[in-house]
Image (spheres, rainbow, N blue to C red):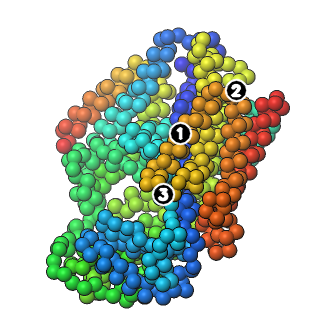
Amino acid sequence: MSAKTTGVSARYRWEVAGRFVLAGVGGYGLTALLSTVLALALPWLPGVSRAEGVLIASLLSFTFYTLYVLWVFAAGKAWRVWWATVLACALLYGAQVLLS
Amino acid sequence: MKDGFRQQMSWLHTWCGLTAGWVLCAIFLTGTLAVFRQPITQWMEARPVVQDAAAGDRAAVLRAATAHLEANAGKARFWRIELPGENGGPVLLVWQGGGPVALNPVTGAPLTGEEAASRKTEGGRHFMSFHYMLQADTPGYWLVGWASMCMLVALVTGVVVHKRIFKDFFTFRPGKGQRSWLDAHNATAVLALPFLFMIVYTGLTFFYTSYMPWPLQAVYGTDGYQRYQLELDGKEPAARRPRGGVPAAMHDLALLVPQAESLMARPARRVLVEQPGRAGMVVRVFGPADDHRAETIANTLSSVAFDGVTGAVIEVKTPKLDQPTTSADVHEVLKALHLVRFGGWNMKWLYFISGLLGTAMMATGTILFCVKRRKKSEQEFGRATAAVYRVIEAFNVAAIAGIAVACIGYFYANRLLPVEWSDRALWEIRAFLWLWLATLLHALVRPFMRAWVEQLAAGAVLCLLLPLLNYLTTGQHLFAYAAAGDWQRAGVELVALGFGVMLAVMARRARQVQKGKP
């Protein structure tokens, strides 16, 4: 990321490592919750069966994951990504408990 | 972080591509070879070239097979008879806990000694299982999943950072160092882009219930997979035929097989007998696994099921457009797309070439990373930068040239390991893995440009000498295969020769660079 300066700060390294963990682990957790909620919610739509909800949500999960990883590395402030992820996970978990 | 969306995406593309690129090169090359796993398996089993099956009396062969199974496997739960495919070979008998026994496809007599000789080997299946598990069970399986996600990210970021996709189709400026590597990376990526997106997405969704099981578990519970499949299919489970039952004689296979062939309008390739010798017996006759004339892409396997005692037809399945489809077919189509279960040999060749383009795209990408930094270090790793670059160079050599050496070395292990070893199939795979590790160590100790030259040259020599090795160890050769019309096995050697020439050209080029020419 910092090509011009010689050597990068320790803080920067921790930030990149943090984003890496967030993208991998946090991204998987968030994707799992999002597609689960989607699978539970989709059968409310007319014409979508319970099984089709699971199929659609599972097949889309890989797209969600990809988009999330892009966002983690594109966002300006790292702490904002962390907070947004924690908040989204909490909300989705609540939705999952309500729906199932 | 650098400012600007495009710069950030470019950074992500570089590092995501580099770290996953090494293992992706191996996954891609082995996956590309796995397109031709059946011909590779046949080459590695090295059965003697047998006469054409069409000349024999098949009714007599089927009766001989039935007699052999009744005599040797009367208590087995199932029997399987493999009939010779396009390129001849023996009739194979397999049963629960026994076989395979090879029969002469002309006379039906069991083949013995030299005639039956077939090397125990995983053959082309090794490339397939390495492709999705790296021969490392569950950790390997998840590592492949991680690499695939990285590839998806690298593809999307690659498109984002790109300014002129269309122009790159026609842009290649050779002999210009870094610029040429970038051109090659772009050209291969753009050319194969639809294929690359398709293959990585279908690869991930192939195992969606394992990689992302949570939606399924939330809706159906932890053991709900079967209920889920049934609901998707919209069908009630087929009633199970009662087990066991009174002993009964089997209907004549020599009558059932031709009847199945006329019902399917396809040649029979496999006969499966469930509960042989019992009243509840079912005979299933299957058509070719690669159906070139299928009108649909999913569920292309034709089959006819008979009541094994009376010979009454229970069920006929053929791949036709007018068959009703269900949501369960979605996954079947994704699988068929990934496994090239459609379009016959032409489509397989198209996948093979696209797979090689994909491998070249990753290889040029990881090389580009180093070529850029050879000129001017970017100091990403502080004082350790030079050492880290050195290790990255070595990983590049092992991931690109090394995996090629390991793949061709696997064929050598097959011919050189003693035929009588009981676990020789395992040692062939070990040879592959050890050889790959050896190429990494070699690349770490040698100056890296020399390592490039030496490993590419080694790969070239091994590929070019493969037909000779085959002749010396088994007495079989390219011309004999070609003369017998066995183009699958001849094709394996021809492709090896093609790879040999390609690797030799690359070795020569690397040597010029090593000597300081641009």
The first of marks 3 and 2 along the sequence is 3
Viewer-nearest residue: A66 or B93? B93
Position of residue B240 relative to residue B370, above or below, is: below
Tags 3 and 1 on a common chain: yes
Residue B431 x %, y %: 53, 44
Eyeballing the image, is B85 above or below B4? below
Name the residue beneath numbered marker 3: B420
| Disc on the earlier residue, 3 or 1 | 3
Residue at position x 38%, y 32% in the image:
A27
Q: Quadrant of the N terminus of chain B?
A: top right
**In this rendering, which labeled residue sits more in front, label 3 or label 1?**
3
Say what secondary structure mark 2 lies in: loop
- Which residue shows up at 53% across the image and 39% down it? B434
Q: Which mark is residue A80?
A: none
Rendering quarter of residue B93: bottom left
User: Which residue, given by chain and number where applicable, does mark 2 sit on?
Assistant: B447
Q: From this view, report whether residue A27 is shown above or below residue B375.
A: below
Q: Residues within 10 Å of mark 2 (few under 14, many from 20)?
A: some
Q: Position of residue B459 (x, y in %)?
A: 67, 45
Residue beneath label 1, please?
B434
Q: Quadrant of the C terminus of chain B?
A: top right
In terms of secondary structure, where does tag 3 sit? loop
Local secondary structure at mark 1: helix
Which is in the foreground here, disc 3 or disc 2?
3
State the separation of the CA atoms marked 1 and 2.
Answer: 21 Å
